[in-house]
Image: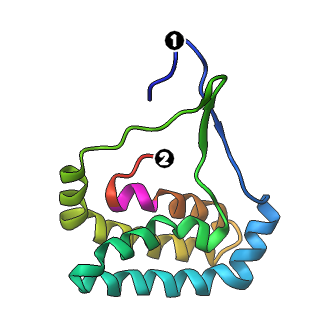
Amino acid sequence: MSNRGDTPVVAVRQGPGCLIQILWFVFIGWWLGSFAVGAAYVMFLLIVTIPVGIAILNNIPMIMALRQPDRLVTAYGEVSVPQHNFLLRALWFIFVGWWLAGIALTIGYALCMTIIGLPFGFVIFDMVPAMLTLRRS
């Protein structure tokens, strides 16, 4: 992260509150997210549509629980997070990311089926983009 001097960087979370996120997940997110994950993995089978599948999985937190990524803000404005090299991210996706994200999504779903595990499932859904393509948020 690059900022100007010693200016503090603050993570700002956007989106609806916890109750709305839970209600969304209970009534819509669990089945819409399941459909989106299935569609994304079908896209991986068709080589040309891999970018669409990655885009879908990068948006899983939003689809399943209306969770938006944190914005990093300083007194001077929004800070962009530098990403890893494209080749490294592509190799990660091919050899590790697709199956690691699949395992994480399965665990996240299992945790969300319990009241106590619901927050932990949401945290796992938030980590899926980083697991899939080493995306920094």
Q: Quadrant of residue 50?
A: bottom left
Residue shown at 45% from the left, 80% from the top: 37
Q: In the rendered view, tell whether residue 115 sits above or below residue 43.
A: above
Query: Depth check: 100 or 40 in front?
Result: 40
The segment highlighted magenta reads: 128-132
Q: Residue furthest front?
A: 76
| Secondary structure of residue under mark 2 | loop
Does the magenta run of residues contain 61? no
Q: Is residue 38 left or right of residue 84?
A: right
Question: Please, what is the three-letter code of the amino acid marked with disc 1?
Answer: Gly
Query: Percent x, y for residue 23?
Result: 78, 75
Q: In the rendered view, tell whether residue 94 sits above or below residue 69.
A: below
Q: Is residue 70 left or right of residue 82?
A: right
Residue 137 disc label: 2
Query: Percent x, y for residue 2?
Result: 45, 25
The span from disc 2 to disc 1 (Cα, nearest Å) is 21 Å
Residue shown at 68% from the left, 46% from the top: 13
Question: Please, what is the three-letter code of the amino acid marked with disc 2?
Answer: Ser
Q: Magenta stretch mostly in which secondary structure?
A: helix
Residue shown at 35% from the left, 62% from the top: 132
Query: Depth check: 131 or 76 in front?
Result: 76
